[in-house]
Structure formats: structure tokens, C-alpha cells
């Protein structure tokens, strides 16, 4: 966690005095400050607990939340890590909440490291929609993705036969099927991702049916339900990206539900 309670008020790990006594904003259990040269400053539960805040976050995840918060603040924006609004419970706190400078529209930035049940993603999204919060969902780029990546031009890579996780497909749909941003936790850079159809080759076949009837099937292709060709454009430093808004209508598919309302994305 980047935020804890100190004397009843929110305090960030970067600003917390070492001799303070801190508590989890969710379960109110005691947490300890961890801050050093090699780790991003954060709080950890002192004792084992079932609180969602005790679920271990990787150093890269904590560092990315801190990077986004500090970068936006340097631009003069109000940005708060691990922020809750209205009736959104602690379990659904935004990784980073930032407010647009002119309209004061809140934007929830969600870094999605691992797969969550789609129902939980949809509950969060509909909650933000009801409160007028714009949403920007950013899945993590997995290190093994680069194992099969190939250059397609000066600014892009293609990952053939890429198996997108369910939350990536849901985020792609939330963005009106126009791609999504991915975060590289190792380099702390961002990539624009476009999942495109992947064609599978069906080989020719020759067989005999009952009565010695000869059958032949010509080679053909079909679109894969599982795999995509993932196009990656980048990388981009967060310093070079701004946040833009758009509106989307409610949508439903066989597998997913998306709310109507404001969505956000990065632009150069």
C-alpha cells in the first residue's frame, strides 16, 4: 500500500515519518512503513490478515502507481493514489485518481496486473459510471510477450498468436474496440496495443466414408477464437502522454457488459 492512516488522516509512504504509528484504511489493522533505497516506499500489514490491502503487490506495481501519481502532480494536477470515492468500497479503490484541471472530472486509473473475475471488473466499471468517474484501465505487459515479438515497422512490433487475457479483451471492448494501453512494469514505459484477428490454417484432408466414398477437403483458413495478432506501438514515457476523454454507450456481448459514460485514454 502507498497510503495509510496516521492520526486519522491519509498519509503517503513517501511523506510518513519513520517513528509514526500507522493503520490500514480498510481493516484499520496496524501497518508498518517500509522505505529504502531499493524499494518503493510503502506500508505493509504488521500481522497476517484477510484484508484486501494485505495482498502482496509487486514492487513494480507499487512503483508504477507512484510514478503515475508523481508525474501527474509535477504537471500541477491533483492526483491521489489508492483513492476511494462515494460508495466505492476499499476493495475497489482506484490505483490512482486524478482530476481534470478545467472540468474537475475525476479519472480512475486502474493498473491491471493479474486477471480478475470479469464480474468484478464490470462491477467496478459500473460503479465509476454511476458516479461520473472517467476510467482508464491499463493491463500489464507480460515479460514473456517479447519472446515471440517481431518488428513490423520502425515504431511497432507484432506478437503473432498472442493469447489475450480475459480482462484485456474486456478493456479492449470498453475502449470501443479501438485498442488499449499497456504498462511495462520493468521499464515503466507504456505501449499502445491493438489486438487483431489471427488466422489459422486448416490443412487439406483426404478420407473415405462408408461405402468407400472418397472425400477431400481443400486447405483453408479460419479466424481463431483464442489467439490474436497483437500490435504494439511505442514505447512511450508517461511524461510525453496526456489524458483525453470520450463518451461511450452501454454495450453487451455474449461474454461481457460495458457501461455507458466517460472513458479516458492517453494521447501524445
Image (spheres, rainbow, N blue to C red):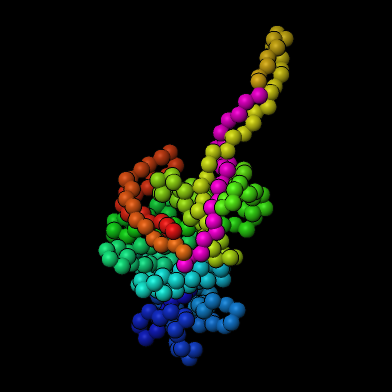
Place of residue 258 in the rendered image (x, y in percent of width and height, measured from the top left): 37, 47
Taking depth in this image into account, of 211 and 65 the one nearest to the observer is 65
Image vertical order of residue 9 relative to residue 257, above or below: below
Majority secondary structure of the magenta segment?
strand
Place of residue 54 in the rendered image (x, y in percent of width and height, measured from the top left): 50, 71
Q: Which residues are magenta?
A: 219-239
- Residue at 40 percent across and 49 percent down: it is 174
In screen coordinates, is 188 left or right of 10? Answer: right
In screen coordinates, is 228 left or right of 6? Answer: right
- Residue at 64 percent across and 31 percent down: it is 201
- Residue at 44 percent across and 42 percent down: it is 255
Quadrant that contains the C terminus: bottom left
- Residue at 29 percent across and 59 percent down: it is 131
Say if the magenta span includes residue 225: yes
Place of residue 139 in the rendered image (x, y in percent of width and height, measured from the top left): 50, 57
Please identify the residue farthest to the left as the structure is shown. 103
Please identify the residue farthest to the top as the structure is shown. 211
Image vertical order of residue 4 relative to residue 204, above or below: below
In screen coordinates, is 265 left or right of 103? Answer: right
Residue 173 visible somewhere in the drawing = no
Say if the magenta span includes residue 165: no
Image vertical order of residue 242 relative to residue 168, above or below: below
Residue 182 visible somewhere in the drawing = yes
Amino acid at each position: 500500500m502507498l497510503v495509510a492512516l496516521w492520526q486519522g488522516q491519509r498519509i503517503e509512504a513517501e511523506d510518513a515519518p519513520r517513528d509514526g504509528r500507522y493503520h490500514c484504511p480498510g481493516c484499520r489493522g496496524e501497518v508498518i512503513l517500509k522505505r529504502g533505497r531499493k524499494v518503493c516506499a510503502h506500508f505493509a500489514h504488521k500481522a497476517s490478515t484477510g484484508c484486501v490491502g494485505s495482498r502482496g503487490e509487486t514492487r513494480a506495481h507499487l512503483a508504477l502507481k507512484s510514478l503515475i501519481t508523481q508525474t501527474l502532480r509535477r504537471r500541477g494536477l491533483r492526483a491521489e493514489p489508492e483513492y476511494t470515492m462515494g460508495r466505492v468500497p476499499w476493495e475497489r479503490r482506484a490505483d490512482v485518481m486524478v482530476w481534470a484541471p478545467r472540468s474537475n472530472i475525476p479519472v480512475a486509473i486502474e493498473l491491471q496486473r493479474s486477471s480478475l473475475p470479469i464480474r468484478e471488473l464490470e462491477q467496478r466499471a459500473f460503479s465509476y459510471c454511476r458516479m461520473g468517474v472517467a476510467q482508464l484501465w491499463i493491463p500489464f505487459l507480460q515479460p514473456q510477450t517479447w519472446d515471440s515479438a517481431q518488428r513490423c515497422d520502425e515504431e511497432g512490433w507484432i506478437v503473432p498468436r498472442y493469447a489475450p487475457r480475459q480482462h484485456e479483451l474486456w478493456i479492449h471492448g470498453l475502449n470501443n474496440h479501438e485498442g488499449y494501453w499497456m504498462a511495462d512494469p520493468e521499464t515503466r514505459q507504456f505501449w499502445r496495443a491493438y489486438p487483431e484477428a489471427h488466422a489459422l490454417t486448416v490443412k487439406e484432408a483426404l478420407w473415405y466414408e462408408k461405402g468407400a466414398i472418397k472425400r477431400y477437403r481443400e486447405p483453408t483458413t479460419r479466424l481463431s477464437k483464442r489467439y490474436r495478432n497483437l500490435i504494439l506501438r511505442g514505447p512511450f514515457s508517461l511524461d510525453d502522454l496526456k489524458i483525453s476523454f470520450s463518451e461511450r454507450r452501454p454495450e453487451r456481448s455474449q461474454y461481457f457488459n460495458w457501461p455507458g459514460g466517460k472513458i479516458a485514454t492517453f494521447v501524445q
